[in-house]
Image: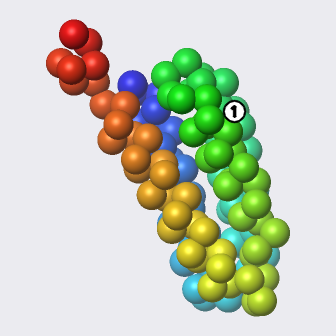
Amino acid sequence: QITIRKSGEKMDQMLTDASKLTENQEFYKAKTQLEKAEEEYSQHEWKLSFFINHTLVEELGEQLAALPALANSEGAEELISQIDSTKVKILHIIRDNRMSLTNIF
């Protein structure tokens, strides 16, 4: 649970930073940040597979992998939209995997 929450919060912050960089038209920095986010995810992906539906883990990985290609002036609006969508998925994973009595019993 701790790994999911900590990794998710870190990913959320990295994506928020990339979105702000995109809004400021700092596309190279945004792309670099998105590549770091993807790398961060790939380091923890195998751990998440123990706790989360494999399909969800794969979908999130695919979403993250597609983001850097949109980091340019033509793809800026789409990138921000896709970052928001990815953040929603991450926050959904964090929320749905919190330890509760229903998870235990």
Task: Tell me which residue sits at (28%, 24%) in the image.
Answer: 99
- Name the residue located 77 percent from the left edge and 89 percent from the top edge: 74
Question: In this image, 83 relative to 101: left or right?
Answer: right
Is 87 placed above or below 104 here? below
Residue bearing the label numbered 1: 43
Q: Residue 17: x, y in percent? A: 55, 68
Residue depicted at 21% across the width and 20% down the height:
102
* Location of the N terminus (image quadrant): top left
Q: Residue furthest front?
A: 55
8 lies left or right of 63: left
**What SS does tag 1 mark?**
helix
Residue 32 seen in this snapshot: no
Q: In which quarter of the image is residue 79?
A: bottom right
Question: Nearest the camera: 15 or 101?
Answer: 101
Residue 35 location, x and y as percent? Answer: 75, 56
Q: Foreground: 14 or 102?
A: 102
| 104 vs 98: above or below | above
Count of residue discs? 1
Q: How crowded is mark 1: few (under 14 residues within 10 Å), some or many (20 or more)?
A: few
Q: Residue furthest top?
A: 105
Q: Which residue is drawn at 51% across and 28% down?
A: 52
Tell me the kind of residue under disc 1. Gln
In the picture, residue 80 is in which quadrant?
Answer: bottom right
Say whether residue 49 is left or right of residue 75. left
Image quadrant for the C terminus? top left
- Asked whether residue 19 is in view, the answer is yes
What x and y, as percent, mark residue 94? 39, 40
